[in-house]
Image (tube, helix red, strand yellow):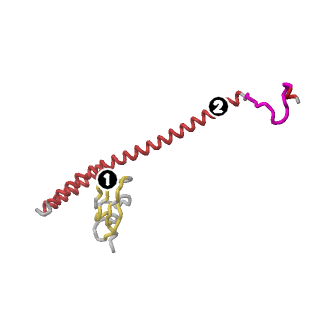
């Protein structure tokens, strides 16, 4: 056998492993590894940013809820005062409840939800919900003649539309 005398053995399975790789191929493998590492890091950074944004949003929601609840404490305090005077003059209690109602309406307005309770205006389906019609009002057809329940807000920022009665065509 040739292998015993220092010559190369050409039998299958006894070939020497090739230790040299084409330099261009080695550079490409190295670049792929770098890019894969960058991709993993970018995905991790994106996931961390998403989690941080979710935490920030939750904190901001909680702060806003606390701010609104704090605003409502003044309304609650005034209701408590009105109830404390319930045994005294009925007119004073009514005036107190009316003042608290005005305070609550003002609070909703400051929060961006103004009260909408106008009658005599044209019916607008984006601001009104018709709960009935009435003939013989003297108002043009399609005019709001009664506000059954006020609405709050405008356009896209509407808590609820006003429930209204609308003038109908005169029977004739």
- Residue drawn where x is 57% and y is 35% of the image: 38
Place of residue 87 in the rendered image (x, y in percent of width and height, measured from the top left)? 12, 63
Q: Residue furthest right?
A: 1
The residues tagged by marks 2 and 1 sit, at their Cα atoms, a distance apart of 61 Å
Q: Nearer the viewer, residue 132 or 143?
A: 132
In the displayed structure, does residue 39 sit left or right of residue 108? right
How packed mark 1 is, by other alpha carbons closer than 10 Å (few <14, some 14-19, many 20 or more), is: some
SS of the residue at dot 2? helix
SS of the residue at dot 1? loop
* Marking on residue 82: none
Where is residue 119, by image quadrant?
bottom left
Q: Quadrant of the N terminus?
A: top right
Judging by the rendered image, the residue that carries numbered circle 1 is 113
Judging by the rendered image, the residue that carries numbered circle 2 is 30
Q: Which secondary structure class fits the magenta region best?
A: loop
Q: Quadrant of the C terminus?
A: bottom left
Q: Residue furthest left?
A: 89
């Amino acid at each position: 056998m040739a292998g015993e005398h220092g010559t190369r053995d050409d039998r299958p399975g006894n070939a020497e492993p090739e230790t040299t790789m084409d330099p261009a191929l080695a550079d490409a493998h190295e670049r792929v590894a770098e890019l894969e590492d960058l991709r993993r890091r970018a995905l991790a950074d994106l996931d961390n940013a998403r989690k941080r944004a979710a935490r920030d949003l939750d904190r901001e929601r909680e702060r806003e809820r606390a701010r609104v609840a704090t605003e409502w404490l003044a309304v609650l305090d005034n209701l408590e005062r009105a109830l404390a005077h319930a045994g005294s003059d009925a007119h004073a209690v009514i005036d107190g409840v009316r003042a608290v109602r005005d305070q609550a309406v003002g609070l909703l307005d400051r929060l961006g939800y103004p009260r909408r309770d106008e009658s005599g205006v044209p019916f607008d389906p984006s601001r009104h919900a018709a709960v009935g019609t009435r003939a013989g009002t003297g108002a043009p057809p399609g005019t709001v003649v009664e506000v059954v329940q006020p609405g709050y807000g405008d356009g896209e920022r509407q808590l609820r539309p006003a429930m209204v009665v609308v003038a109908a065509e005169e029977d004739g």
